[in-house]
Image (tube, rainbow, N blue to C red):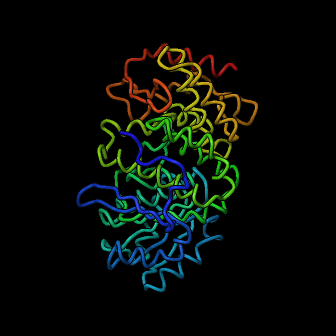
């Protein structure tokens, strides 16, 4: 299933706003992509989620930068019910935060016909999405992602969740949003590190199914980092369309949706080891994980060594880590501990771990045929470097 229309950016129409449709029958929804959409969000929500008052969930960083604009837009449509501001960072995805958030939303008198607005990056999207799925047995949800990672990936597809000591996102639900609003202008306020981390998820879409998009990114990635509006809109559109196609085909990850986890089995284990801290951002962990997946595939003779080297070289050129040794700090994870974390992966079936491997760039596939010892030995060598 190739990504749609991944040609040069100059083929974009004069109207920069793009709409990607996620086809899921009665639960279908649109993703609106473009500059300046935050100030129009009240109107967009009123159209897509009729009669819904909005309770906004955000974090301290986003609140300082953007909450006033969102509130003003919601107030114009008489939709604003209230807001709550949480601490930023992966550690917020916990049972404690979930419990407190649900109590806050009930205190705002959120009803079933209302909507929780997840206004932030992947952490806020996952946590607020989870809360909306269980509050009053399910209220409506609007995702307004503010990071590159959330705009191209985590805000789309309905996965919600929190972390546990056993692993990342092991507790959660599938709960599709009613609308996603991706304002590409808000990406200007991201730190360079956060933007780079989000780029790992962008490159992932080229690596799993669209070699042409991967090549386009190799030639055009600097435009994303220097605020080329058209390049940013096009990139978010392509990634969202790719995910929409896969989610429409396999909403609950029984088949092809697992491909979206390229690099995540290794990456999530590294995040658990790092304590869900700022030491290792999710996108950085995914970058290392994708490089490892390509390297393991090359060692197994599944893909050309040159492809593995090309992927690692591009990630390094962007400024992303590709090796476990690249993680800041002197200590290194124990290979056995990493393996134990990987064994808790959501794709485990009867104790058998699924790996997302590759036959080349744009040719990812799912395998359950790799012996555990092979991966354990691979991890041991990578942790020793």
Q: Looking at the image, which is closer to me, 263 or 95?
A: 263
> What residue lies at 38% left-to-right and 33% top-to-bottom?
347
Q: Position of residue 323 (x, y in %)?
A: 66, 28
Rendered residue at 34%/60% (across/down): 134
Foreground pick, 127 / 179: 179
Residue 108, quarter of picture: bottom left
Q: Position of residue 264 (x, y in %)?
A: 50, 36
Which of the image's four quarters has the C terminus?
A: top right
Q: Can residue 118 be seen from the camera position used here?
A: no
Task: Determine whether, in the image, residue 182 is placed left or right of residue 228.
Answer: left
Q: From the image, which quarter does the N terminus lie in?
A: top left
The extreme right residue here reads: 330
Left or right of 284? Residue 354 is left
| In-image side of 204 versus 157 (left or right) | right
Q: Is residue 46 above or below residue 146?
A: below
251 over 302 or under it: above or below: below
Q: Position of residue 288 (x, y in %)?
A: 60, 33
Q: Residue at x 63, y 38 (%)?
A: 274
Q: Is residue 231 visible?
A: yes
Q: How many marks?
A: 0
Q: Residue furthest left?
A: 26
Rendering coords of residue 350 (x, y %): 32, 25
User: Which residue is drawn at the image coordinates 58% and 25% (left, top)?
Assistant: 308
Closer to the camera, 318 or 92? 318
């Amino acid at each position: 299933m190739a990504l749609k229309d991944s040609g040069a950016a100059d083929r974009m129409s004069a109207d920069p706003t793009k709409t990607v449709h996620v086809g899921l029958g009665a639960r279908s929804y649109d993703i609106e992509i473009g500059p300046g959409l935050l100030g129009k969000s009240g109107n967009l929500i009123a159209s897509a989620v009729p009669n819904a008052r909005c309770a906004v969930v955000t974090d301290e960083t986003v609140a300082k930068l953007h909450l006033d604009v969102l509130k003003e837009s919601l107030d114009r449509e008489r939709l604003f019910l209230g807001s709550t501001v949480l601490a930023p960072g992966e550690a917020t995805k916990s049972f404690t935060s979930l419990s407190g958030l649900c109590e806050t939303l009930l205190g705002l008198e959120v009803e079933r016909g209302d909507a929780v607005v997840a206004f932030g990056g992947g952490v806020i999207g996952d946590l607020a999405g989870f809360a909306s799925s269980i509050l009053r047995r399910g209220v409506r949800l609007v995702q307004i992602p503010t990071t590159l990672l959330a705009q191209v990936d985590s805000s789309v597809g309905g996965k919600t969740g929190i972390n546990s000591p056993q692993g990342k996102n092991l507790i959660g639900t599938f709960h599709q949003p009613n609308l996603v609003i991706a304002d590409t202008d808000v990406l200007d306020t991201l730190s360079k590190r956060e933007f780079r981390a989000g780029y790992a998820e962008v490159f992932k879409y080229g690596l799993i199914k669209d070699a042409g998009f991967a090549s386009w990114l190799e030639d055009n990635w600097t435009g994303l980092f220097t605020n080329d509006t058209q390049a940013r809109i096009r990139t978010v559109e392509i990634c969202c369309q790719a995910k929409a196609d896969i989610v429409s085909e396999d909403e609950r990850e029984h088949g092809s949706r697992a491909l979206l986890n390229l690099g995540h089995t290794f990456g999530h284990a590294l995040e658990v080891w790092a304590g869900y801290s700022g030491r290792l951002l999710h996108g950085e962990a995914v970058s290392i994980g994708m490089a490892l997946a390509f390297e393991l595939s090359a060692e197994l003779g599944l893909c050309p060594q040159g492809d593995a080297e090309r992927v690692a070289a591009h990630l390094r050129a962007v400024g992303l880590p590709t090796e476990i040794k690249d993680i800041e700090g002197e200590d290194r994870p124990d290979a056995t501990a990493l393996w134990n974390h990987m064994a808790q992966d959501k794709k485990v079936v009867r104790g058998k771990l699924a790996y997302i491997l590759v036959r080349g760039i744009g040719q990812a596939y799912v395998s359950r045929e790799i012996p555990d010892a092979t991966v354990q030995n691979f991890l041991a060598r990578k942790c020793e470097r």
